[in-house]
Image (spheres, helix red, strand yellow):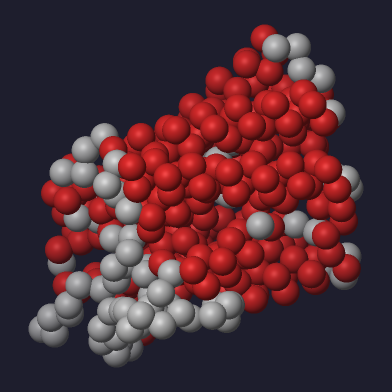
Amino acid sequence: MTKYPTLPLAADLYNDLEPSPESSWRDLVPGLMVAVLATMAAAFVADHYSAPLTLMALLIGLALNFLGADPRIGPGLGFASKTLLRWGIVLVGARITLGQIIDLGPLTLLAVVAILLATLGVGVVVARATGLGGAFGTLAGGAVAICGASAAMALATTLGEKRANQAQLALVLVGISAASATAMFLYPSLAHQLGLSDRQAGFMLGASIHDVAQALGAGYSYSDSAGQIAAIVKLTRVALLAPVLALVAAFFRAEDGKRTGITLPWFVVGFFVFAGINSTGVIPAAASGGAQDVATACLACAVAATGIRAPMSSLLETGFKPLLVIIVSSLVALALSLGAAVLLL
């Protein structure tokens, strides 16, 4: 039986890691079957108990963590956490149009950008202050600032495993999913207590809640009008994922000390292409909805594979500091979003 070395959790753009061993499609089947079955179980639980799909996929993946030591499923799990992740990121572009972003107005758009950058910056500052380093701050702060677990997986792909290891990514996924689910229930109540208008509440919820599903769920639980505003604001944050990834790729040096420039990874280019095509209106609604469903499935499967492959012993040794980065970044995003909603809308 062929023994495979440990595969990287996410693709590494800088070739920091040894190339994965060549595998035939038969080698991928066992690991892919495990990841797909875990995702199907997560979808069942999420559907029947109104739970976040990403969180359920991660928790079920962690419950199956003991399987990660089996070398037979390594290639398939590596494929799920790398290739499926990248295609999921590409298909996320089918969720947005340029018209939705323009309708926000220039001041509101600038506020979304400023909140995103401030939240990301706070994550980096807190991570460095606690000794976790700028790369982890970028991972955790970016997940809070952009679109939760999807952004965390994309940022991990861009940073490379030597900058954001498996234990750190798994902890960020757990923390960001829990924080997003908590925000979905608490933030609408806060908006009611403060007497925000539908437009103000929609902006605040869309600009502060981490994952797309939770942001939209919170918005529509407030009102239909608030839900529409929350969707536009949230999808604007999703659209900013690509330029943030480009900035991260330009900022972090490769192992040889040279900067990589601003060359976009292919999945970022694909993200832009899908968003542009979707903006033209030539994609039928059914096809756009199908692309969103496929994107959700790919990302959930990648998250499940991440949970299965996460080194739990290292995860448990990380302590409270990584969660502190997520908590502080989340509170900053909430405060800034609330302030912008009151002042601008």
Using the rendered view, name the quadrant where residue 28 is placed.
Answer: bottom left
Residue 292 visible in the picture: no
Residue 100 versus residue 161 in the image, above or below: above
Q: Nearer the viewer, residue 213 or 60?
A: 213
Residue 147 versus residue 273 in the image, above or below: above
Name the residue at 33% across, 84% down. 256
Name the residue at 84% across, 29% down. 345
Name the residue at 49% across, 62% down. 154
Seen in the image, is 325 located left or right of residue 284? left
Using the rendered view, name the quadrant where residue 184 is placed.
Answer: top right
Name the residue at 45% across, 54% down. 138
Residue 210 versus residue 309 in the image, above or below: above
Q: How many marks?
A: 0
Using the rendered view, name the quadrant where residue 317 is placed.
Answer: top left
Residue 156 position in % (x across, y down): 41, 62
Residue 121 versus residue 330 in the image, above or below: below
Residue 226 position in % (x across, y down): 78, 29
Residue 233 position in % (x across, y down): 74, 43
Residue 215 position in % (x across, y down): 63, 36
Quadrant in the picture for the N terminus: bottom left
